[in-house]
């Protein structure tokens, strides 16, 4: 079985390292301009060069998002940014605007172009058009069903790659083309500055009943009438693979490195098991679905892949089943302790989990050393502190520690 590429978000350097460490085949990240995540960390020119170098050293690929649609007076700057990205050796530019694609094909003929999901590609003639324009890949609109993806691949073969989102937040508008943020806040979603007003709480009133809230599906947090549920297609990976999808994309350039690590690691294990034996994948699926819930998430569904979403909208707030505690920053010392950078408090005696590439191992936390003072402690609640503690065999730099979600006022 030909396993699709696993493509993970790299909103900043920490997320990039997490994606590479936990098994992404490729990552995507933005520069300071012309992407649709202006509030992610993103990469300046030198930072991008370093990020691409790190990615290539790991044998992986780096794609740069340039999917904002430029006005005439922005085209020169757009081209300059593309030339800067190309000079770093990026593996592709992700672009949505047809005019921008034509301009890039003229001025940067050797750079690979992937057509962004913002282009709303829904049919074979559109995908074929982008292929004929010289694009290597099209990232399908999120509204595509599995049957339609399969049919498109049957018609196009391998003449152009098909990429689809498999996990993460979804927009309430058509492939993200939403004017709600621009209307309510002056921050345009199509310019990378979405304030996500679809996630806000709303109440509905009827014209002749001012001040009377009509009953809309609501929990104790409020009503999320316009908010689409998150996407999770873990259970449908065999179908997507058989349909000929070339790349499986995890959403999340605004997400934490821990989120990227958890979701990338889970999908990596899923794809590896699927490649080895479908029965192994099926047996592990309940644990894999539980694993992605260890990162911050909202209610999820399968989006449009099986037709219309079963229960569109009404996604409540965030929750997670495990909490990120620390990152391993080096090798074990002579006393058998590993250096860690602390993020959240835990206690000696807690049952913790060490997240290693390909596996997760539970263990009981022992007292640890605070590097700053040399004292042995049972707990410490200062993020950014360096500690040294005993970990399970096989721990390595970049591994993450997690544990139960707790009230940090303790």
Image: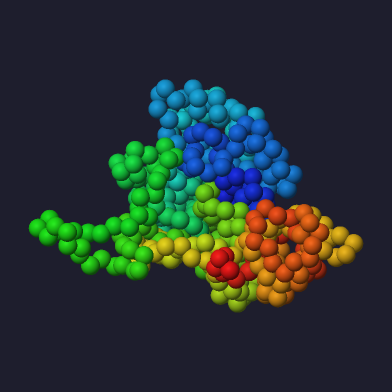
**Place of residue 105 in the rendered image (x, y in percent of width and height, measured from the top left):** 53, 29
Q: Residue furthest left?
A: 208
Q: Quadrant of residue 298?
A: bottom left
Question: Looking at the image, which residue is at 48% across and 47% down?
Answer: 139
* Picture layout, residue 193 above or below residue 221: above
**Place of residue 381 in the rendered image (x, y in percent of width and height, measured from the top left):** 64, 61
| Quarter containing the N terminus | bottom right
Q: Colour mode? A: rainbow
Question: Looking at the image, which residue is at 39% across and 49% down?
Answer: 196
Can residue 157 be seen in this snapshot? no
**Place of residue 14 in the rendered image (x, y in percent of width and height, measured from the top left):** 64, 49
Instruction: Tell which of 380 and 250 is nearer to you.
Output: 380
Q: Quadrant of residue 184?
A: top left
Instruction: Tell which of 82 and 314 is nearer to you.
Output: 314
Instruction: Tell which of 279 and 49 is nearer to you.
Output: 49
**Place of residue 310 in the rendered image (x, y in percent of width and height, measured from the top left):** 35, 67
Question: Looking at the image, which residue is at 57% across and 65% down?
Answer: 408
Can residue 65 be seen in this snapshot? yes
* Picture layout, residue 174 above or below residue 348: above
Q: Total label count?
A: 0
Q: Could you tell whether 257 is left or right of 79 in the image?
A: right
Q: Quadrant of residue 68?
A: top left
| Quarter containing the C terminus | bottom right
Q: Could you tell whether 192 is left or right of 184 in the image?
A: right
């Amino acid at each position: 079985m030909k396993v699709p590429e696993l493509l993970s978000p790299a909103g900043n350097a920490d997320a990039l390292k997490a994606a590479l460490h936990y098994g992404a085949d490729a990552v995507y990240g933005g520069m300071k301009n012309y992407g649709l995540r202006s509030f992610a960390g993103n990469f300046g020119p030198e930072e991008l060069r370093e990020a691409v170098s790190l990615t290539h050293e790991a044998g992986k690929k780096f794609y740069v998002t340039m999917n904002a649609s430029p006005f005439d007076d922005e085209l020169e700057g757009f081209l300059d940014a593309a030339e800067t990205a190309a000079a770093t050796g990026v593996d592709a530019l992700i672009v949505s605007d047809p005019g921008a694609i034509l301009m890039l094909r003229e001025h940067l003929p050797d750079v690979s172009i992937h057509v962004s999901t913002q282009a709303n590609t829904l049919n074979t003639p559109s995908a074929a058009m982008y292929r004929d324009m010289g694009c290597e890949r099209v990232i399908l609109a999120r509204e595509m069903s599995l049957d339609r993806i399969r049919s498109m691949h049957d018609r196009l073969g391998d003449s152009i790659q098909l990429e689809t989102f498999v996990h993460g937040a979804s927009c309430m508008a058509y492939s993200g083309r939403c004017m709600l943020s621009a209307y309510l806040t002056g921050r345009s979603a199509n310019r990378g500055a979405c304030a996500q007003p679809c996630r806000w709480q709303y109440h509905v009133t009827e014209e002749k009943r001012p001040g009377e809230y009509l009953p809309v599906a609501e929990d104790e947090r409020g009503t999320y009438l316009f908010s689409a549920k998150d996407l999770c297609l873990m259970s449908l990976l065999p179908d997507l693979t058989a349909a000929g999808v070339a790349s499986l994309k995890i959403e999340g350039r605004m997400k934490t490195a821990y989120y990227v690590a958890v979701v990338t690691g889970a999908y990596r294990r899923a794809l590896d098991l699927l490649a080895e034996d479908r029965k192994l994948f099926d047996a592990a699926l309940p644990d894999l679905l539980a694993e992605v819930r260890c990162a911050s998430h909202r209610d999820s569904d399968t989006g449009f892949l099986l037709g219309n979403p079963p229960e569109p909208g009404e996604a409540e707030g965030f929750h997670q089943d495990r909490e990120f505690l620390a990152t391993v920053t080096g090798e074990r010392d002579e006393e058998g302790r590993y250096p860690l950078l602390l993020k959240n408090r835990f206690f000696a005696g807690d049952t913790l989990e060490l997240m290693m590439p390909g596996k997760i191992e539970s263990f009981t936390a022992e007292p640890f050393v605070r590097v700053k003072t040399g004292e042995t402690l049972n707990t410490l609640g200062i993020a950014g502190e360096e500690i040294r503690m005993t970990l399970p065999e096989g721990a390595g730099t970049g591994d993450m520690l997690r544990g139960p979600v707790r009230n940090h006022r303790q």
